[in-house]
Image (cartoon, rainbow, N blue to C red):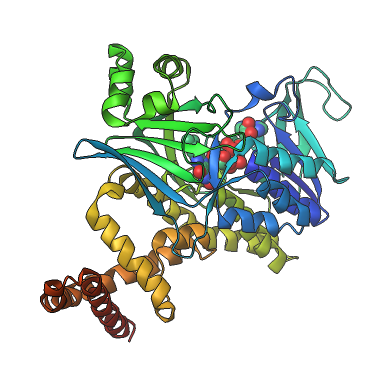
């Protein structure tokens, strides 16, 4: 069985590993040079640090290579929650918001490090061949043939000349948001395709260590400076630096470029970033020198053609980064795909069909949730109503486990529940909560009258919660029954 994987990003590399441990003859074709080559590595890929969570970790573990997940996890910084940086009544304050009522963490890591760990494992496998600096230029899914351009100086026996053709049993397209495999797939399947560039660009900033080599701000958080129309975030790195990202509209970037008032903008909207994280000079320099990049959101379906080809990762569902799920979802694609392929060992057409059917609603759900989460990160995290709802949901989650209650965030981030089921569960909870809040409010009035006079604010709060719990249980019974 010859499996050709196009793209050796995190998702393609994991797909190649899943195929290789099943004994396929795997060939990986990657446009860029090998990221492990020290002479080219810095030019290879933008160094993005990102949040790895349960779905990604689970997919790494399910390779069956026991040391892989451990090697990856060793190179991460745990983030217990968000730290919100705001001005309240003119004063700069930092507020920590835990991610999970049960104390589970997100893991900050460098995407290139993850990619390197996967590629290292692949290199050690005898049934895997790598072809770096090779660009996919054509696919005929019906004839199971693909064409590549060899961009290396060396032309080996297999790849004589700059362009060559090969055949495959299965082709896995993991070639990112601007996927060439997807473009060729569209020619043979009636693909529904939707793409959107949102009105936000992103620009990265490096934040150095302090002069004595330490983190400049508390390391175990994803730091957010929420400013509604723009947002600045900082994620820790294992070398005690941070990588920060500014998200802002295209117009906003253009205005700052034209006016040159980037320091003034930061001072007004992102308190203490200058000079606590970055000097004025460095901020100005990085704003000019670092790229201002667009954010794309892509939905399409189906993901496959017959038994010949399938797309995974950003090639199938590029999403905006506000839920921290793009790569996690891509790694999960691989686990789901191979689970289904294992279920139908002698009927790949049926397996790929089932994969598209199962994965489409899940990928499209997380795509939508990611689009919606900008508002939560850039605005809602500052609002008392958001914090109240978070508190109620988390308290129900901890104190009434029999209700099966959990926040949408924790289900997306800390579970392997299908994204579409997460969404349905959250909608059901929202309906229950709406009824419960109505009934709970009656309890608020009663509890406040009873206890507030005695200074029993905490008891009043617990009374409210008890009211909401009872109401939630009742409402849940009504809705489910
Ligand atoms: P890619 O990483 O894009 O890899 C595709 C590979 O295919 C590349 O190596 C490319 O060179 C190769 N290729 C392309 N065309 C060809 C061709 N014609 N022939 C051969 N090879 C080709 N995700 C998270 O889970 N958590 C986060 O916190 C997070 N934060 C993010 C922050 C930002 C600012 C951004 C932009 C993204 C973030 N993501 C995050 C998303 C994550 O980076 C992507 O979802 C992930 O990198 C997708 O992996 P992939 O392997 O599918 O695609």
Coordinates of residue 397 in the picture (x, y in percent): 40, 71
**Residue beneath the point at 60% across and 53% down:** 56
Image quadrant where one finds the C terminus: bottom left
Question: Where ligand 1 lies, by quadrant?
Answer: top right
Q: Is residue 216 left or right of residue 273?
A: right
Coordinates of residue 40 in the picture (x, y in percent): 71, 21
Coordinates of residue 138 in the picture (x, y in percent): 65, 33
Residue 13 shows up from this direction: yes
Q: Is residue 45 left or right of residue 377?
A: right
- In the rendered image, the vertical position of residue 462 relative to residue 365, given as above or below: below
- In the rendered image, the vertical position of residue 47 relative to residue 14, given as above or below: above
**Residue 147 image-quadrant placement:** top right
**Residue 184 image-quadrant placement:** top right
| Number of marks present in the image shown | 0
Residue 405 shows up from this direction: no
Q: Nearer the viewer, residue 209 or 1?
A: 209
Q: Is residue 24 left or right of residue 143?
A: right
Q: Nearer the viewer, residue 111 or 418?
A: 111
**Residue beneath the point at 28% across and 44% down:** 379
- In the rendered image, the vertical position of residue 31 relative to residue 66, given as above or below: above
Q: Nearer the viewer, residue 472 or 191?
A: 472
**Residue beneath the point at 64% across and 35% down:** 112
Coordinates of residue 378 in the picture (x, y in percent): 32, 42
């Amino acid at each position: 069985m010859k499996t050709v994987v196009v793209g050796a990003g995190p998702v393609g590399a994991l797909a190649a590993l899943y195929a290789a441990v099943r004994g396929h003859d795997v060939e990986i074709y990657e446009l860029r040079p090998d990221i492990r080559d020290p002479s080219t590595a810095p030019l290879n890929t933008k160094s993005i640090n990102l949040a790895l969570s349960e779905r990604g970790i689970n997919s790494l573990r399910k390779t069956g290579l026991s040391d892989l997940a451990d090697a990856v996890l060793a190179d991460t910084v745990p983030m217990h929650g968000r730290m919100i940086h705001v001005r309240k009544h003119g004063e700069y304050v930092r507020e920590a918001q835990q991610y999970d009522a049960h104390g589970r963490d997100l893991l900050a890591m460098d995407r290139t490090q993850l990619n390197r760990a996967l590629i290292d494992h692949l290199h050690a496998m005898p049934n895997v061949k790598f072809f770096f600096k090779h660009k996919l230029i054509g696919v005929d899914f019906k004839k199971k043939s693909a064409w590549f351009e060899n961009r290396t100086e060396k032309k080996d026996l297999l790849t004589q000349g700059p362009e060559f053709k090969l055949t495959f049993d299965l082709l896995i397209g993991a070639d990112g948001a601007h996927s060439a495999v997807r473009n060729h797939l569209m020619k043979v399947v009636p693909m529904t395709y939707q793409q959107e560039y949102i009105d936000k660009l992103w620009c990265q900033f490096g934040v150095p260590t302090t002069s004595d080599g330490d983190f400049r701000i508390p390391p175990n958080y994803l730091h957010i400076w929420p400013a509604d129309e723009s947002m600045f975030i900082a994620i820790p790195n294992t070398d005690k630096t941070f990588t920060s990202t500014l998200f802002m509209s295209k117009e906003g970037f253009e205005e700052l470029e034209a006016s040159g008032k980037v320091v003034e903008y930061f001072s007004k909207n992102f308190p203490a970033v200058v000079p606590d994280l970055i000097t004025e000079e460095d901020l100005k320099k990085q704003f000019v020198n670092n790229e201002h990049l667009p954010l794309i959101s892509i939905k399409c379906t189906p993901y496959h053609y017959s038994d010949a080809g399938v797309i995974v990762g950003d090639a199938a569902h590029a999403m905006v980064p506000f839920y921290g799920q793009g790569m996690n979802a891509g790694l999960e694609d691989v686990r789901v795909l191979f689970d289904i392929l294992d279920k139908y060992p002698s009927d790949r057409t049926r397996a790929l069909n089932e994969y598209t059917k199962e994965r489409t609603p899940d990928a499209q759900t997380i795509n939508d949730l990611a689009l919606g989460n900008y508002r939560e990160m850039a605005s809602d995290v500052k609002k008392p109503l958001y914090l109240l709802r978070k508190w109620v949901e988390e308290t129900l989650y901890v104190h009434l486990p029999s209700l099966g209650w959990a926040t949408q965030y924790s289900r997306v981030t800390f579970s392997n529940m299908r994204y579409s089921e997460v969404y349905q569960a959250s909608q059901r909870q929202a309906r229950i909560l709406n009824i419960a809040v109505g009934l709970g409010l009656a309890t608020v009035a009663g509890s406040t009258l009873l206890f507030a006079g005695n200074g029993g604010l905490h008891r009043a709060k617990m009374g409210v919660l008890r009211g909401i719990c009872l109401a939630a249980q009742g409402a849940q019974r009504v809705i489910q029954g």
